[in-house]
Image (tube, rainbow, N blue to C red):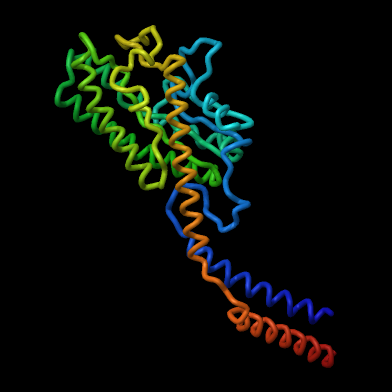
């Protein structure tokens, strides 16, 4: 019986190596989507788990009344998530978020996530732009050059953020938000809206590139808030800004809907990749397993012969 068990173990091990190697080659990808497997039972779920929200004051729900919920909770409730962990930090830049990802508690939260939202970048560009406007009355050539340098650095930070989030939460869907333009497109602010729009468009192009390289879908906050943001902003200008920049309750509903749309697209993309994988796996008839069975049997016989040889020597 020991010999028979040895033979079966070797046969099973050889078959497993052969089939696992084929599956691994078919599944090779640089995507930041959850890992694709051929087992439908392992399909990542978007319900009943934990949504972790990373970002700045927009994610945190800054300036919302106590009775209102920020977009991460609205999105989590709509998805049927059991828990929402909102890690938004007021005033955070992409560099701040990148540094925070090394914190033990953040790593622990991400390890439990099945959905992660990332909404960062407004403070990377709008804060410096407003400061330059206050200092110079306009955006000089030097100011613009510095701001586009900030956008480039933001792109580098964001790529690292997405990679680290994926490493900490490899089975989670990542929803990456782009940036909306909070500057009113009317009256005295119309020209400023145009300038801000050029900078935000540049930043959003960077976000789109990072998403495309990772196989992610962008939650389109830019379109959700639209060209006339006043109806979606809170009524009180932020200190240092001549206009409001944070979403009101209706604005957060718009952002939640944009996130749900992006997530649905990612789930669809995941299922498409899964179907491709299943279709790419070759059928292995019993005859195709015979070489593996033969090798397993031969190895078992050799093991048995070796055992008997040394038993006789003893």
Tell me if residue 274 comes above or below residue 297 in the rendering.
above
Q: Which of 93 and 235 is in front in this view?
A: 235
Q: Which of 14 and 158 is in front in this view?
A: 14
Could you say which quadrant of the image residue 77 lies in?
A: top right
- The residue at 21%/17% (across/down) is 192
Residue most extreme to the top: 236
Residue most extreme to the left: 141
Number of callouts:
0
Tell me if residue 44 comes above or below residue 218 in the rendering.
below
Q: Where is residue 212 in the image (x, y as percent from the top left)?
A: 36, 45
- The residue at 56%/58% (across/down) is 38
- The residue at 85%/89% (across/down) is 314
Could you say which quadrant of the image residue 208 lies in?
A: top left
Could you say which quadrant of the image residue 56 lies in?
A: top left
- Asked if residue 129 lies left or right of residue 47, the reply is left
Tell me if residue 129 comes above or below residue 99 in the rendering.
above
Q: Nearer the viewer, residue 165 or 244?
A: 244
- Asked if residue 16 lies left or right of residue 121, the reply is right
Tell me if residue 304 comes above or below residue 164 in the rendering.
below
Q: Position of residue 311 (x, y in %)?
A: 83, 88
Viewport quadrant of the N terminus: bottom right
Q: Where is residue 300 in the image (x, y as percent from the top left)?
A: 72, 83
- The residue at 49%/60% (across/down) is 277
């Amino acid at each position: 019986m020991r010999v028979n068990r040895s033979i079966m173990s070797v046969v099973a091990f050889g078959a497993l190596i052969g089939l696992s190697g084929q599956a691994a080659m078919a599944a090779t990808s640089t995507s930041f989507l959850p890992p694709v497997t051929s087992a439908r039972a392992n399909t990542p779920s978007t319900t009943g788990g934990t949504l972790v929200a990373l970002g700045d004051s927009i994610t945190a729900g800054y300036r919302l009344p106590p009775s209102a919920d920020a977009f991460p909770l609205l999105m989590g409730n709509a998805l049927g998530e059991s828990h929402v962990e909102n890690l938004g930090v007021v005033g955070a830049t992409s560099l701040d978020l990148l540094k925070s990802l090394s914190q033990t508690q953040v790593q622990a939260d991400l390890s439990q996530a099945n959905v992660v939202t990332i909404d960062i970048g407004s403070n990377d560009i709008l804060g410096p732009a407003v400061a330059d406007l206050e200092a110079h009355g306009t955006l000089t050539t030097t100011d613009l050059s510095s701001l586009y340098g900030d956008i480039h650095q933001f792109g580098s930070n964001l790529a690292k953020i997405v990679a680290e989030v994926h490493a900490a939460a490899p089975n989670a869907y990542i929803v990456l938000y782009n940036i909306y333009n909070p500057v009113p497109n009317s009256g005295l602010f119309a020209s400023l809206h145009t300038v801000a729009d050029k900078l935000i468009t540049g930043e959003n192009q960077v976000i789109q590139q990072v998403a495309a390289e990772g196989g992610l879908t962008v939650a389109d906050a830019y379109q959700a808030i639209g060209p006339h943001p006043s109806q979606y902003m809170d009524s009180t200008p932020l200190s240092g800004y001549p206009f409001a920049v944070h979403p009101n309750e209706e604005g957060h509903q718009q952002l939640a809907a944009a996130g749900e749309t992006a997530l649905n697209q990612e789930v669809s993309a995941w299922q498409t990749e899964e179907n491709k994988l299943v279709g790419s796996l070759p059928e292995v008839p019993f005859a195709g397993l015979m070489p593996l069975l033969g090798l397993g049997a031969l190895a078992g016989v050799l093991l048995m012969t070796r055992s008997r040889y040394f038993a006789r020597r003893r």
